[in-house]
Structure formats: structure tokens, C-alpha cells
């Protein structure tokens, strides 16, 4: 079957003390029994994640769709700089803040300079002007950060949970829906 994920990503290219914040958010999630506190084989990659737990029923309006019966059901925490892209959900629009053109169908190598940690800018492949990655409008939403929380095969979260997550991170968040 095909897997999907929802990633919650702070809208900051470099999150201050990202590993400490990752631990803090994990502690918050385990204190509410949303995920298990120990690592196990429950995410898609070869790394380990934190498996779904009983409290997850309180963070979605579709608790019957929670992946309790799937092996890939956990939380993956990322603390390396990463482009959180939508996978098979693609990219319909990427609007440059300078020329206002949609560059989603141009050469995507403009993302490489951010991914390779050269700086936090993207250079528009049409007007060649560099702007901060968060000045570009991605639709559907993508994430760009060195911190991210990816939930495998979970249904949509409640607005309350997303708001609480935002408060944990003390900044705006991107919510990235990925299909493998
Ligand atoms: Zn441009």
C-alpha cells in the first residue's frame, strides 16, 4: 500500500537549538501519550521513530483512521536541514516574491543552494533575484528547516492540536502533506 505523512515544520530555515527543541516537543507529546517514548521500527526509513499511542485519539477528528494496525505508524523527528516536499502530491505553484511568476515548472535546481546550506535564499530561475525561501509561496505547502515532525499515515490533525504545536515551537508552522 502507499504511505503518506503529515510533517509539521517551523517556518525557520535554522531553528535555534533545534535538537533541544526536538527533545522538548517529544517530551510534550509523550506526556500526552500521543506517541511512545522509546524508539522502534515504525517509520518508513531505516531509522527508528516513536510509535503511535492511545492519546493520539485526541488530536484528530478521525480517530477511526489512526494507523494502529499498520507497522508504519510513528513519528519521525528530523534535526538535519531538509526540504520537506510533498512527494507524489507534487508542486503546483512556487511564486517568486520579486517577479511574481510561477517557477514550479522550471528547473528545480534553484532549491539546491538552500538544501546544500549555502544560505537561506532561493534564486528565482526566471528573474535571477535571490530572496529568502520563506518569501516564496509554495502550493501545496512545502517545508524548509533543520527541525521537523513527520507523522506516518495519520489522518488530519485538529486545529487545536496544530495551534498547540505552534505554541510549542513559538513560531509559525508549515504543514506538509506527502504521498509516497
Ligand atoms: Zn523571479
Image (tube, rainbow, N blue to C red):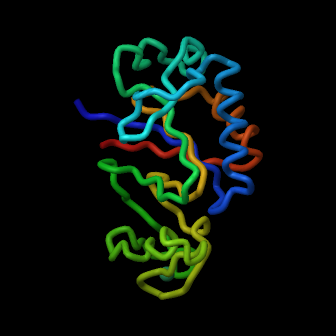
Q: Is residue 39 above or below residue 58?
A: below
Which quadrant, please, contains the N terminus? top left
Classify residue 47 by image quadrant.
top left
Q: Is residue 87 above or below residue 3?
A: below
Q: Which residue is farthest left?
A: 1
Closest to the observer, 172 or 82? 82
Classify residue 135 by image quadrant.
bottom right
Where does the image place residue 19, in percent across and percent down from the top left?
67, 48
Give the residue drawn at x 40%, y 33%: 43
Where does the image place residue 8, in percent across and percent down from the top left?
57, 42
Give the residue drawn at x 36%, y 72%: 108
Closest to the observer, 134 or 39? 39
Closest to the observer, 180 or 137? 180
Give the residue drawn at x 60%, y 23%: 37
**Label total for image:** 0
Q: Is residue 91 above or below residue 151?
A: below
Where does the image place residue 74, in percent across and percent down from the top left?
46, 28
In the displayed structure image, the side of residue 10 where residue 177 appears, left or right: left
Which quadrant, please, contains the C terminus? top left
Where does the image place residue 97, in percent across and percent down from the top left?
57, 74
Closest to the observer, 20 or 167? 20
Give the residue drawn at x 42%, y 82%: 125
Amino acid at each position: 500500500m502507499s504511505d503518506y505523512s503529515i510533517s509539521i515544520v517551523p517556518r525557520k530555515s535554522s531553528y535555534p537549538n533545534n535538537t533541544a527543541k526536538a527533545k522538548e516537543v517529544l517530551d510534550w507529546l509523550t506526556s500526552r501519550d500521543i506517541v511512545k517514548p522509546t524508539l522502534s521500527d515504525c517509520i518508513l526509513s531505516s531509522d527508528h521513530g516513536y510509535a503511535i499511542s492511545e492519546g493520539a485519539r485526541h488530536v484528530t477528528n478521525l480517530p477511526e483512521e489512526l494507523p494502529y494496525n499498520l507497522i508504519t505508524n510513528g513519528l519521525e523527528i528530523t534535526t538535519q536541514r531538509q526540504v520537506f516536499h510533498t512527494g507524489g502530491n507534487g508542486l503546483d505553484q512556487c511564486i517568486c516574491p520579486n517577479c511574481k511568476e510561477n517557477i514550479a515548472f522550471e528547473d528545480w535546481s534553484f532549491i539546491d543552494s538552500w538544501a546544500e546550506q549555502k544560505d537561506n535564499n532561493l534564486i528565482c530561475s526566471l528573474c535571477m533575484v535571490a530572496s529568502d525561501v520563506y518569501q516564496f509561496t509554495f502550493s501545496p505547502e512545502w517545508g524548509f528547516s533543520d527541525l521537523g515532525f513527520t507523522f506516518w499515515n495519520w489522518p488530519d490533525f485538529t486545529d487545536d492540536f496544530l495551534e498547540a504545536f505552534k505554541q510549542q515551537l513559538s513560531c509559525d508552522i508549515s504543514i506538509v502533506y506527502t504521498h509516497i
